[in-house]
Amino acid sequence: MLRQWGVSAILVLGLAMPAMAEEAPSAEAVLEAASEAMGTANVHSVRYSGTGYITSPGQSYSSALDDTWPRYDMTYTRTMDYDSNSWRDEQVRNQSTWSPRGGGGRPTDRSDQTVIESYAGGYAWNEGGNGNPQSDPRFVIQRQLEIILTPHGFIKAAMAAPDATVQRQIESSRSTRYVNIVTFKAMGKYPVNGWFNADNQLVRTQTWLPHEILGDLYLETRYTGYQTFDGFQFPTAIHRSWGNPPHPGHELNITRVEPNVANAGLLVPDAVASADIPDDTEITTTELAPGVWMLGGPHNSLAIEFADYAVIIEAPRSIARGRAVIEETRRLIPTKPIRYVLNTHHHFDHSSGLRPFGADDIVVITHESNFNFYEGVVFDLRPRLLVDDGFATAPRQVHYELVDEAFSLTDGARTLEVAHVETQHSADMLVGFLPEEGILITADLFNRRGPLSVGNPDDAELALYHLIRRNEWDVKTVIPIHGPSATWAEFLSVVGGATALTGGE
């Protein structure tokens, strides 16, 4: 009797157990099922529009690891042409409901800002409100991948890829359903994942991009709220995040979808195709005073000779630019070691060249609030497979001079004074001044990307003016990191001279 019960119990328990998980299907089977469910074969182009927000990557107010990137509200229209591998984004941004706490890339007022971004034929370009296309080769790789990161673009690219594979995972801790994850290498180099749910819809794409600060940058896009539009499926909500831990990139609520838009393919504008591609390693050297040189380029740096060592101000733009600045300084000052680099603030365009300085044991002068960010992110020891980076392959301890409010270097004949100023642009901004030469070096507090805005100073320019007055600096020349130098008289014309003091110091 006992033996019979035992056999019955085993049978009952066997019936109660869930069936074994099915084996993962082939990548071809997953993609064919998704293409049929989502109507991909009949989609040649798509235009979708709606509202949401977008952020300014790497332009946070402070370098605190939990500080968010500045956000804009936006209306958004993207036209994607799969046949020609081209696309166009039209955005109208406004700070609107987001707090103007600070950070780079933020609007100076609450007026609308038009941004148009495009890609075709291996070229990336932007247009402002004036409609003039400006080549921007920095974003070619990312914009090529954007086509693959859309639902139908991923399916088309994966079906054509010779190396597509699939793995099967449980959907979540709240579900017993499975997702199929298709993986291949885009352009033979960049790994891309696509997550397909039980309804054969693409719900997530993942990839990794080369990034000067964040290394192999993780990029994730989630698609939800699928609906049927004229016979094909498309999501009504898209969320993009960057990095780990993730920073929000953009979020879109889609209100209109149009498949197979006529004349959706883009041609590369002549001005873009014929534009000179800027070289981050090109440096135009100008001697400002004996032993002081401006290393000009897309962003400026300074090389300064002291009695026993050399100092560099700013390591901007990229790892390649950082290396070029180091090499040019060693050419100018061959008999003295480079001991210090002054970093004005943490924004990506001003810290992306720092890693070669760490590799050469050059002491980083930066604001004390940046230490955790620089140790944990800028000089982290994780492998960087997509960026040519000597620091990752041969890391060493990085040394710092951490500045609170003021710092100085002197050899008795030459002095570099460093002062901290907090503005809405950045909480950690440092300004350098050479008193014997009267040369002031500043980033983003005074820029010269175009004509001087006489008598109409912004908050950053006024903050710089008041800092100069408080320190009683006798400034003769202002060297911005962005753009050509200015005389003290030109700077005064911008801030309105003594009139600027009416706001109080």
Image (spheres, rainbow, N blue to C red):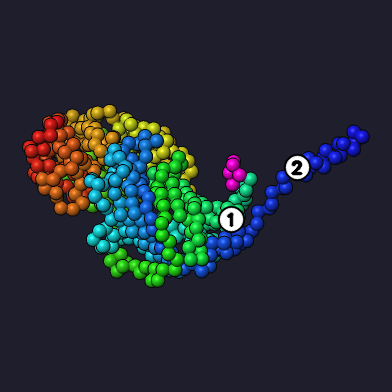
Q: Residues within 10 Å of mark 1 (few under 14, many from 20)?
A: few
Any magenta on residue 174?
Answer: yes
State the residue in front, 479 or 254: 254
Q: Is residue 474 left or right of residue 341?
A: left
* Residue farthest toward the bottom in the current orientation of the protein: 263
Q: Residue at x 34, y 34 (%)?
A: 370
Question: The N terminus appears in which quarter of the rendering?
Answer: top right
Question: The C terminus appears in which quarter of the rendering?
Answer: top left
Q: Residue at x 23, y 29 (%)?
A: 406
Residue 329 quadrant: top left
| Residue type (three-letter) at the residue carrying disc 2 | Ala
* Residue 247, percent from left and from top: 41, 43
Residue 278 quadrant: bottom left
Q: Residue at x 39, y 58 (%)?
A: 49
Mark seen at residue 337: none
Q: Residues within 10 Å of mark 2 (few under 14, many from 20)?
A: few
Residue at the disc numbered 2: 16
Residue stretch in magenta? 171-175
289 up-or-down from 503: above or below: below
State the residue in front, 314 or 177: 177
State the residue in front, 140 or 423: 423
Q: Report helix, strand or loop for mark 1.
A: loop
Any magenta on residue 269?
Answer: no
* Residue 287, percent from left and from top: 18, 46
Q: Main secondary structure of the magenta part?
A: loop
Residue at the disc numbered 1: 199
Q: Is residue 327 visible?
A: no
* Residue 200, percent from left and from top: 58, 57
| Residue type (three-letter) at the residue carrying disc 1 | Asp
